[in-house]
Image: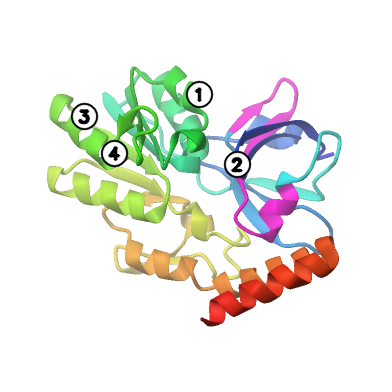
Amino acid sequence: MNAVRNRRQLADNIVQLEVEAPRIARRRKPGQFVIVRVRDGGERIPLTIADADASVGTITLVVQVVGKTTGLLAELDVGEAIADVAGPLGRPTHIENVGTVAAVAGGIGVAPLFPIAQALKEAGNRVLGVLGARSASLVVWEDRLRSVSDRFIVTTDDGSYGRPGRVTEALSDLLMEEKVGQVVAIGPPIMMKAVAELTRPLGIPTLVSLNPIMVDGTGMCGGCRGLVGGQNRFVCVDGPEFDGHQVDFDNMMARLSAYREYEAVSLQAAAAHRFGEEGCRLAEEARRAREQ
């Protein structure tokens, strides 16, 4: 159970895993996630269910290596198993026909956005897809988002692929050209904040996902607290999606940095264990760099 059926390297530090999880594959809905524990005694992390195939009993996870646990997960090969995969969790995305929807993804945000855009398309909406990344090498799942879009734009910050500039610039042009009934934006918090500020004066409902700040997925740890409409909400049980015009993104971004020092220590310990003296040297250099 929970064996890796397929592994694909999408970009540097971004891996796609198809994992055996038949019950989750049958029940999952757009917007939901799983809690993954790579090995016994390890950290629990949330990952959005990016796709699923109920006929073969697999779910697709897209993993970006940002710390120790995601690094361990990305290193798994076909045939190896994940210790625990719990889900589906979270409130499914509310899907309805509003006419035209702009689906905006920043970087790895395309993975959780894809099933939502797919469901919106199946509900009869006209879908305007916008996918942005820092550079061409970090553009992933372009084919998937394009496949459910009636109109599609790729942007890169450095202009190495597609339209030069940020997703907000492409979205701004679309909003002047099309009558959009809803915007769904998933990506880095600063990108979602920019999208929400763009749509706020236009009165366009904007849905964002706060999954980056989730921890245990049950609401018990309180680590995913966020201010939405001036009230504390728990992302894992009340979300992960919220009205972007009500989210306090500054508060969210401050919370994201709360455990950075602890993650650095964990990474250093992992490096020392895996690489011996070389790992210890790298850990010492990292420590000195933080103290400067």
Q: Amino acid at mark 2?
A: Asp
Tags 1 and 3 in contact by the CB under 8 Å rule? no
x and y, in percent, of residue 125 in the image: 33, 22
Q: Give the mark nearest the N terminus, 1 or 3.
A: 1
Q: Give the mark nearest the N terminus, 4 or 1.
A: 1
Measured in 3D between alpha carbons, the distance from the residue under mark 3 to the one under mark 4, in whole angstroms, is 14 Å
Tags 3 and 2 in contact by the CB under 8 Å rule? no
Q: Which residue is mark 1?
A: 144
Q: Is residue 187 above or below residue 290?
A: above
- Disc on res. 12: 2
User: Which residue does the image show at 36% across and 40% down from the upper left?
Assistant: 158
Label 2: which secondary element: loop
Q: Give the mark nearest the N terminus, 3 or 2.
A: 2
238 in magenta: no
Q: Give the mark nearest the N terminus, 2 or 4.
A: 2
Q: Residues within 10 Å of mark 4 (few under 14, many from 20)?
A: some
Q: Amino acid at mark 4?
A: Gly
x and y, in percent, of residue 211 in the image: 50, 53
Q: Which residues are magenta?
A: 51-73
What scheme was used to colour the molecule? Answer: rainbow
Measured in 3D between alpha carbons, the distance from the residue under mark 2 to the one under mark 1, in whole angstroms, is 19 Å
Q: Which residue is mark 4?
A: 165
Q: Amino acid at mark 3?
A: Leu
Q: Is residue 44 above or below residue 151?
A: below
Measured in 3D between alpha carbons, the distance from the residue under mark 2 to the one under mark 4, in whole angstroms, is 21 Å
Label 3: which secondary element: helix
Q: Residue 50 lies in what quarter of the image?
A: top right
